[in-house]
Image: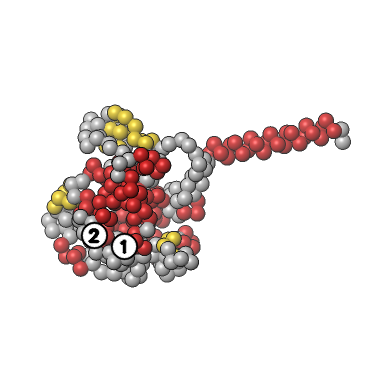
Amino acid sequence: MNKSVKWAGTAAAIIAIAGAGLYYLNRSPDLTDASPTTFNMLDKNKETVGQYIIPDDTTITGHDNAADILYGKRLMNETKRLLPEYVGASMNCSSCHIAQGKVNKGAPYFTTFNSYPRVMPRAAAEVDLAGRINGCFQRSMNGKPLPLESHEMKAMQAYIEWVGQNTPKDVKVQIENAGYINEDLEPDPVKGKVLYAAQCASCHGDNGEGLKDSRGDIVFPPLWGDESFNIGAGMARTYKAAAFIKYNMPMGVQTHGAWGQGDVLSDQDAVDIAEYFSHMPRPDFADKVNDWPKGNKPKDARY
């Protein structure tokens, strides 16, 4: 073969491979992608007044309360390990608040600090941010409330405030805490069991037991059983759980980061899976008798 023809063929192959690589990179940016994720900030008239940028953790050290923010961040990821006396379940805050509360439709913290205090339907009373955090400890963590003046409580609030990036009180970041799910769908737990085995069990276990690594750290949280969230948690409700599943699971399809990007399952599939695992045995919640004292209990409440 003529050398020039051979090298031309090789060059063409290299260009083709490089082109394919560029195409892949354009479609699926990796974890080092420098382009920040932004969302519109809206005023009370729903007019865009600025851009919210998901903050980079490397900027934390520039804050006067950096030590508290960093401790709060660590508490989000290692809640069970660092606060075992307050956490009964094998859960961390980031088990539900994806990527430390930085993912749209994954229970983000973008607007959390500005949203409290507010009246919560379940309590039929005004709840401040500390009360909301303690609600998670008592329900999702199946544990006990943190002391209000503790370093840990203040650190978690500092982290949540930092994620909010000083967004003005009268401005809302245009995000969704959870994605839309059709609540008119009738759940089928029998189908949900089959789907769970196919889509969820590889991470959360055949018996919903979750997965821990060799150091005992939680990799994937348990979805039922004694170490899971209790019956009073939002995730124990079919449609709330389905919305989380629909837009964030399963993890195996992710190409843009450390979590699954969701939208793999249909609304019906997500509802069926949620109905199956949310109704499996889990700890009780004694204070459930005080929930929805003025009525309007959602139809998927477990009690």
Does residue 269 sit above or below 223 in this rendering?
above
Q: Secondary structure at mark 1?
A: loop
Displayed quadrant of residue 204:
bottom left
Closer-to-camera residue (202/215): 215
Q: Secondary structure at mark 2?
A: loop
Please, which residue is most extreme toward the left here?
Answer: 294
Please identify the quadrant where the N terminus is shown: top right
x, y percent for residue 148: 20, 56
Which residue does the image show at 69% across and 34% down from the upper left?
15
Closer-to-camera residue (91/155): 155
x, y percent for residue 52: 34, 35
Q: Amino acid at mark 1?
A: Leu
Please, which residue is most extreme toward the right here?
Answer: 1
Which residue does the image show at 68% across and 36% down from the upper left?
16
x, y percent for residue 263: 43, 48
Query: According to the image, label 2 marks what residue?
Result: 146
Does residue 21 sit above or below 278 in this rendering?
above
Which residue does the image show at 78% across and 32% down from the upper left?
8
Say whether marks 2 and 1 touch (CB < 8 Å): yes
Give how far apart the Cα atoms at labels 2 and 1 are: 9 Å
Does residue 38 sit above or below 185 in this rendering?
above
- Could you say which disc has been placed on residue 173 in the image? none
Closer-to-camera residue (279/90): 90
x, y percent for residue 187: 34, 59
Horizontal side of residue 81 vs 233, given as left or right: right
Horizontal side of residue 115 vs 250, given as left or right: left
Which residue does the image show at 30% across and 49% down from the upper left?
68
Q: Is residue 15 visible?
A: yes
Q: Is residue 96 visible?
A: no
Query: According to the image, label 1 marks what residue?
Result: 83
